[in-house]
Structures are given as structure tokens and as C-alpha cells.
Amino acid sequence: MNTKTIILDRDGVINHDSEHYIKSPAEWLEITGSARAIAKLTKAGYQIAIATNQSGLARGLFTLETLEAIHYKLREAVIYAGGEIELITFCPHHPQDHCGCRKPHTGLLQIIQKKLGLNPDTSWMVGDTATDILAAQRMGIRGALVTTGKGLQTLDSNLVSRETTPVFASLEAFSDWLVEP
């Protein structure tokens, strides 16, 4: 089992986020270079998984079929760039449901660990919020923050320390750093 695994948050890391939620494939807009970054990581031998909170399901803003269509569009963009996504996990619950899968809880990451394997030395969680970094820490893997999405606000909140968490301008900058040319 290859335990070189990169877990990505979705909204704000791979695609532009919206305070109104991403409710359709048309609203899913790639952050420039993110599909290319995933392809670079794939070609370097990393398995790519996504762990994303999707409370819009519980809020009735979109259906499971719509979420699957959004993820199909995401996968197609990555395939077109030459990459592959092994697994997409998502939490469908409302934050007030107090489930075990909504980040910063580790339920989604535990699913990824079971299916793909995680290694504290070679596995990363890349996100734009403190909940992403906290989930990584709780799983015993490395966390990296990107300043796309909510990343700058996360840094301003002092919930994530630059001293303990590497910070990158984008997923593409992270992949360039991790996979030396």
C-alpha cells in the first residue's frame, strides 16, 4: 500500500469558495493551477484524496446527485491535467449535528487511512482553514495551509502558526515545494 498520500480540502484549495456554497457544477470554478498541481503530485507518486465538509446537503441547498456532478467536473479537470483523484470523502452533516466526520474531527481522514493508508512522514493534509490543520494534527499527519480561500483570514485569526505549519500561496505553490523539479 502506497502511503504517500495528499489529502486536500476542496473549497478554497482546489476550487474557489463561496459564502453561498458551491451548489452546482456551473458554480465549481477551479483555482488556477490546482488541477495542474494535483497532476504534478500524482506523477510524483502521491495518492490524492479529498476530505470536504459539505453541510449544503444538510441545509437542502443541493442534492447528493448534484454533489456527485460537481465532483465529476472536478475529477475531469484533474484527469485533463494528467492527474488522478483516488478518493473523495465528504461530511454531509450540519455543523450542529455534532457528527464525527465533520472536520476538525477525523472521521473523513480515518476513511482515507483505511482505504489508502497514511504515514506521518509522507502524508499531508492541505487546507485553507484551522479545522483542516487541526484534523491533520489529530490524525498525526502533516498539515499545510494555503492562502487561497479562507487561508489569509485563518492566518489573521492566529489559529494556525506559521512556525509549526508551512504556508503556501496556493496548492500549486505547495506542489512545487513538495515535488522539487
Image (cartoon, rainbow, N blue to C red):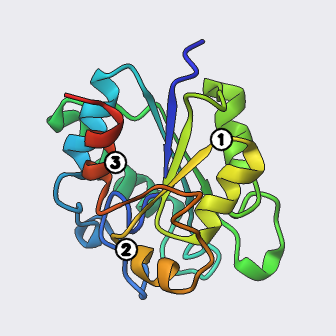
Mark pair 3, 1: CA separation: 16 Å
* 144 lies left or right of 107: left
Q: Which residue is drawn at the image coordinates 27% and 73% (left, top)?
A: 27
Residue that numbered label 3 is attached to: 174
Q: Which residue is drawn at the image coordinates 57% and 80% (left, top)?
A: 60
> Total label count?
3
Mark pair 3, 2: CA separation: 15 Å
Residue 23 lies, in percent from the top left, at 39, 75
Between label 3 and label 2, give the one nearer the viewer.
Answer: 3
Residue 77 in view in this figure = no
Disc number at residue 149?
2
Q: Which amino acid does label 1 sit on?
A: Ile
Q: Which amino acid does label 3 sit on?
A: Phe
Q: Which of 12 and 115 is in front in this view?
A: 12
Residue that numbered label 1 is attached to: 141
Mark before the other along the chain sequence, 3 or 2: 2
| As drawn, 61 above or below 176 | below
Residue 137 lies, in percent from the top left, at 71, 52
Mark before the other along the chain sequence, 1 or 2: 1
